[in-house]
Amino acid sequence: MDIRLQQLSYSSRLLLHECPRKFQLNRLNTEIENHREDDDSQLTFQYGHTVGEGIQLLLAGKSMQEVIWISFLKWKQDLFADDVKRKKSFTLAVIALQKFSALRSAGFLKEYELVYYKGKPAVELGFRIHIPGGFKYRGFVDVVLRHRETGEVLVLEIKTSSGNVIANSYKNSAQAIGYSVILDFLFPKLSSYKVLYLVYKTKELEYEPVSYNKSYLQRALWIEELLIEVDKLKLYESRGVYPMHGESCVGKFYKECKYLGTCTLSTERLTSPLTLESLEKLEKESYDAEVSLEDLIKTQLENTKGIEDHEPELASTDRVYTTGLEDQIL
């Protein structure tokens, strides 16, 4: 299997669910005319990145003036580009950051402090999980906070949304569950049950915090599901077919897939061969934490055993799933 197909992440898993063929073409560096995203998508991405990174910098101790200057220097789109419908622009991104600063001044998250990992603030904390067979799963945790009194770890996930319904949009998100799994390993002496989604609603110009608890059951299922998807990729590769999901040809806002009309051509004609330069680039990628899947499973099993005396009902339920992971270590 091409090593590029073995590099997994939360976004690539979403793409794999959407359409395996699109996942394959994306991963193999497609070179077709409509490869570039449209300007609206670029502005949406830039806006979300600016707000997210700005909040991380504010939590890390930067002043508002410093954050605005850094955001200005990193803004890659036209400074006056404006998505009127979704209310996204550089100016509106700055307003979002000012509103977050006001929340902090009013006492938002005052009982939490920023966690440091290996002497660095745990913002955009990068990790990579090594999975047997050459597969790797990478991710970046927005912010890791710790309660000043209880020591409980809180994962702060920053989102921007132009939608109207927020409450349950992220309830079963695999992204946050994956973060809790890795944090259990990185901070074994701390609890990491809570995930707080801080969603900035762009149309209302206000934040909506939504908190979820992540159980050991969900962590165990996350590992199992990741392994199932690895098995799927192996099956697709062995059969030489990555299925095309026709229902995904037209996505949100009636936007057509960029490969529509070309995805039935041969893979060789649509992709670039793996070069030595690409291979070296992948090998040089560095992350704050490099973890093996075996170690993650062992940590989950140990943590589950540790709660049996305190929460027997919860533990018995979770053990039904976590004991099934023991076979994955062998």
Image (cartoon, grey):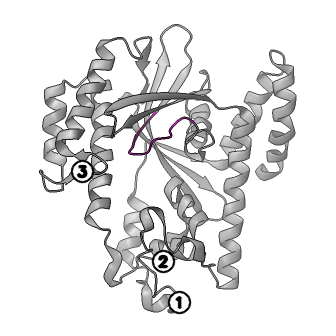
Name which residue lies at 24% across and 39% down.
93
On the picture, is 308 further left or further right than 219?
Answer: right
Q: Position of residue 183 (x, y in %)?
A: 56, 33
Front residue of 312 and 196: 196
Q: Which residue is mark 1?
A: 264
Q: Position of residue 145 (x, y in %)?
A: 46, 23
Front residue of 233 and 167: 167
Mark 1 / mark 3, whichever is N-terminal: 3
Spatial distance from mark 1 to mark 3, Cα to Cα?
37 Å
Residue kind at label 3, given as amino acid type:
Val
Q: Residue furthest top?
A: 149
Front residue of 23 and 319: 23
Does residue 121 appear anywhere in the picture?
A: no
Name which residue lies at 38% across and 37% down.
201
Spatial distance from mark 2 to mark 3, Cα to Cα?
33 Å
Q: Position of residue 327 (x, y in %)?
A: 83, 50
Cβ–Cβ below 8 Å for labels 2 and 3?
no
Does residue 329 appear anywhere in the picture?
A: yes
Picture quarter containing residue 171? Answer: top right
Image quadrant containing the N terminus: bottom right
Q: Which residues are magenta?
A: 157-167
Residue kind at label 1, given as amino acid type:
Thr
Q: Which residue is mark 3?
A: 84
Dot 2, crowdedness within 10 Å: few (<14), some or many (≥20)? many
State the SS at label 3: loop
Residue kind at label 2, given as amino acid type:
Leu
Picture quarter containing residue 189? Answer: top right
Mark 2 / mark 3, whichever is N-terminal: 2
Spatial distance from mark 1 to mark 2, Cα to Cα?
11 Å
Q: Which residue is mark 2?
A: 25
